[in-house]
Image: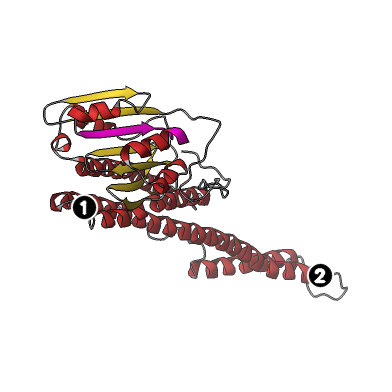
Amino acid sequence: MPMSRHRKPRKRIELPPIHLGPGILEQSNTSTPFTIDIFAWNTDRFVEHKITSLIDIARLRENLPILWLNIDGTPDAAILSQLGQLFDLHPLALEDVQHPTQRAKVEPFGENLFVVVPMPINESGPFETEQLAMFVGPSAVITISERCDGDCLEFVRRRIRQHEGRIRDKGAPYLAFAIFDTVIDHYFPIVNQLGERIDMIEEDVVDSRTAPDMYAIRDAKHDLAKVRQAIWPMRDALTAMMTMEAWFDMEHRIFLRNALDHVMRLIDMLDSERTMASDLMELSIAIANAKLGEVTKVLTMIATIFIPITFIAGVYGMNFDFMPELHWKYGYGLALGLMGLTIGGFLLMFWRRGWFRSAMMGARPARRE
């Protein structure tokens, strides 16, 4: 994967307008596309609908008590207000839906629990997240994703359609856990790919014994920091959810502990990769300094050899009339012999001191398993 040598622009958090009070939704003249899907079921029956209006929700809930309302794309203020009236959602929570915060958190509002989770958009391309806002009520779960081009919850939908696992046998709190846990699981391939990138950089250093690409290391560290920033608040969110007995009983808290364990594993993996990336950055600097030392050593040897023979050539290049060897037929050979002996002596000294052994030819470091 080619790495850019330019600084990547950071995604800035969209802040609510300062002219509006808290809990007041912003009215916009432009509408963004969104889709609404409804999953409703009881112990014997299941229905799935794609709707354009919220009017039919009350009719569906009469015979099918468990409801999952999924909205892909942020709806406008009118839809959010209507949604708040139907399910008694707090205005502050609806404001967070309209203006994504991109940080995991859990807040109780009456009978509804408001959960925010940063959800990865894709697993193969550059790391990006979108906000998944989730309202957990006594018998309904509402999820609103920031974008309308799909999400990572298809596995949960398939389990509901095919009646796999416990989702259709449990209530809304277990559905909320399943959604949260699915989002967490989609971070594992991303962290593994980042680890493979760092392993490839390390293998290049071990095989070629050259300085690694510092820009590639910087990009990897930048992505690790972004993933860690998204995952770290989930630990606090899950810890808070485990204390909320009004929504999660003892059985649910067992599953929440399992999700918390997954988050801690991700954090440990990220910390390990960050340490390795920092070590590679230090190794890059050390190799660059070693190469500079090699160049300096070669120049020092050349200068050391040529200074004395230049002195000899200078002495025998003087044209005084009374120089003893000026008219001696062996004088030229004597001067060349002195130069050769000087060169040979210095080369022998350099060899005895190990200067001809490159600093990069040390013991081969063991590869990381």
User: Residue 176 vs residue 231: left or right?
Assistant: left
- Placement of 160 over or under 273, stated as above or below: above
Which residue shows up at 86% across the image and 69% down it? 319
- Element under disc 2: loop
Q: Amino acid at mark 1?
A: Ala
Residue toward you, 31 or 14: 31
The region drawn magenta spans 66-78
Residue toward you, 318 or 164: 164
Q: Amino acid at mark 2?
A: Leu
The answer for how far apart the CA atoms under marks 1 and 2 are is 110 Å
Residue 112 picture location, percent across and down = 29, 46
Residue 134 picture location, percent across and down = 33, 42
Q: Which mark is on residue 326?
A: 2
Numbered disc in front, either 1 or 2: 1
- Element under disc 1: loop
Residue 75 is inside the magenta segment: yes
Residue position marked by numbered label 1 in the rendering: 246
- Placement of 143 over or under 296, stated as above or below: above
Residue 252 picture location, percent across and down = 17, 49
- Dot 2 crowding, Cα within 10 Å, few <14, some 14–19, many 20+: some
> Is there any visible trace of residue 144 in the rendered image?
no
Residue 305: image quadrant is bottom right
